[in-house]
Image (cartoon, rainbow, N blue to C red):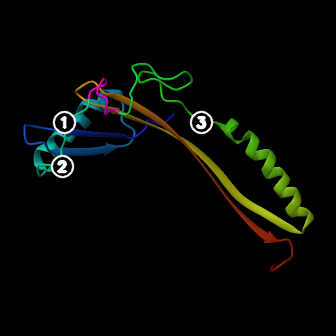
Amino acid sequence: MPSPPWVIAMTVSCRPRAGVVSRAGVREDQVTDVVAAAEQAARQSSPVEEAQPLLGPSDPAAFAVKETPEPGLPGWDDEPDSTGIGVFAEFSRALAEAFQTAAAAGRKLYGYASHSLTSTFLGTSTGLRLRYDQPTGKAEINAKSGEPGG
């Protein structure tokens, strides 16, 4: 399974500056280098005028962050989940029906479906830890007449 992309933002010094670095396929032994690159990008950037203090995990403005996730939701330390063919189980039954209906009307259906799962982690030096897993599915289907040239 390929490594997810990493995006790391850092602020440096009393005049907050931000540096963002994105790399795909980062191995655990490369994280330090990515952080160093983000720190370098922050040192070279302009001060961020709208910067605010970082929220901590118990800060009431931290979107009601809980120390432990709700049942069924992944925690900060849990491995990123993966997706598989099983996500198409219900969709494939509906797709089979669509293919049968199209065939009965003299049309042919073509296309593809894809599914991905992206885990986003946010951690701050004040202890805030947030995680969100975003499943994304896509299907593209074309219909063509079963008749030549149609």
Between residue 8 and residue 36, name the one nearer to us.
8
Q: Position of residue 60 (x, y in %)?
A: 31, 29
Q: Residues within 10 Å of mark 1 (few under 14, many from 20)?
A: few
The residue stretch that appears in magenta: 56-62
Give SS at disc 2.
Answer: loop
Kindly report the distance in space between the C-alpha atoms of the residues bearing marks 2 and 1: 10 Å
- In terms of secondary structure, where does tag 1 sit? loop
Q: Position of residue 31 (x, y in %)?
A: 29, 31
Disc 3 marks a residue whose amino acid type is: Thr
Write down the residue under mark 2.
Answer: 50
Residue of label 3: 83
Q: 77 left or right of 117?
A: left
Residue positioned 92% across, 63% down in the render: 104
Name the residue that disc number 1 marks: 53
Q: Name, please, the residue furthest toward the top.
A: 68
Q: Main secondary structure of the magenta part?
A: loop
Left/right placement of residue 70 relative to residue 41 reads right
Residue 60: in magenta span: yes
